[in-house]
Amino acid sequence: MAQNFRRYTSNAVGTGATAVYTANSYDAIVGISLSNILSTAITVSCYIYNGSANIYLVKDAPIPTGGSLQVLDGGAKFVVQALDVLKVQSSDAASCDVWVSAVDEISS
């Protein structure tokens, strides 16, 4: 069975929670990169809203000037199901670029 690799991005995420990715089936998130695009340090939160609660992957994690945070490292992956929403929020306006890599429809 062929795998459906997808990428999702969001530029200049700020203080309001931004929905970067919404699962449409049983999917696997295989990478999340959060990059500071400001000339000052920021903090970021990344979480999955599962329809009733926010499940934090990182909360108020610091990212220095010019730095990035790999939310998934060491080969970790997250399995999500239909309508789970990956959201990102930053401490500063227009301060964080986001890149998400996922595998769509890992099972039926």
Image (cartoon, rainbow, N blue to C red):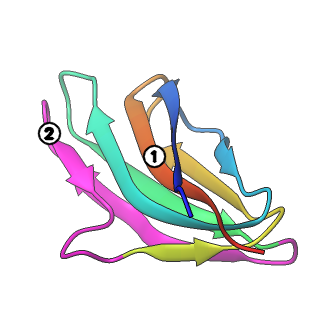
Q: Quadrant of residue 54?
A: bottom right
Q: What residue type is labelled 1?
A: Val
Give coordinates of residue 40: x percent, y percent.
Answer: 20, 30
Q: Residue at x 26, y 23 (%)?
A: 38
Which is nearer the eye, 37 or 105? 105
User: Mark 2 or mark 1, which is nearer the start of the sequence?
Assistant: 2
Q: Which residue is drawn at 42% across and 37% down?
A: 98
Q: Residue at x 52, y 56 (%)?
A: 3
Quadrant in which the C terminus appears:
bottom right
Give coordinates of residue 14: x percent, y percent.
Answer: 53, 32
Structural crowding at the residue carrying mark 1, measured as other residues with C-alpha within 10 Å and reported as few (<14), some (14–19) or many (≥20): some
Which is nearer the eye, 61 or 79? 79
Q: Which amino acid does label 2 sit on?
A: Gly
Q: Which residue is drawn at 50% across and 31% down?
A: 9
Q: Is residue 70 above or below residue 53?
A: above
Which is nearer the eye, 26 or 34? 26
Structural crowding at the residue carrying mark 2, measured as other residues with C-alpha within 10 Å and reported as few (<14), some (14–19) or many (≥20): some
Give coordinates of residue 2: x percent, y percent.
Answer: 53, 56
Q: Where does the magenta region start and end?
A: 51-76
Q: Mark 2 points at which residue?
A: 67
Q: In this view, does 29 lie above or below 88?
A: below
Secondary structure category for the residue under label 2 = loop
Give coordinates of residue 86: x percent, y percent.
Answer: 63, 56
Residue ranking furthest to the front: 1
The numbered disc on residue 66 is none
Judged by depth in the image, the label closer to the viewer, 1 or 2, is 1
Q: Is residue 19 above or below residue 38?
A: below
* Magenta span includes 60: yes
The numbered disc on residue 100 is 1
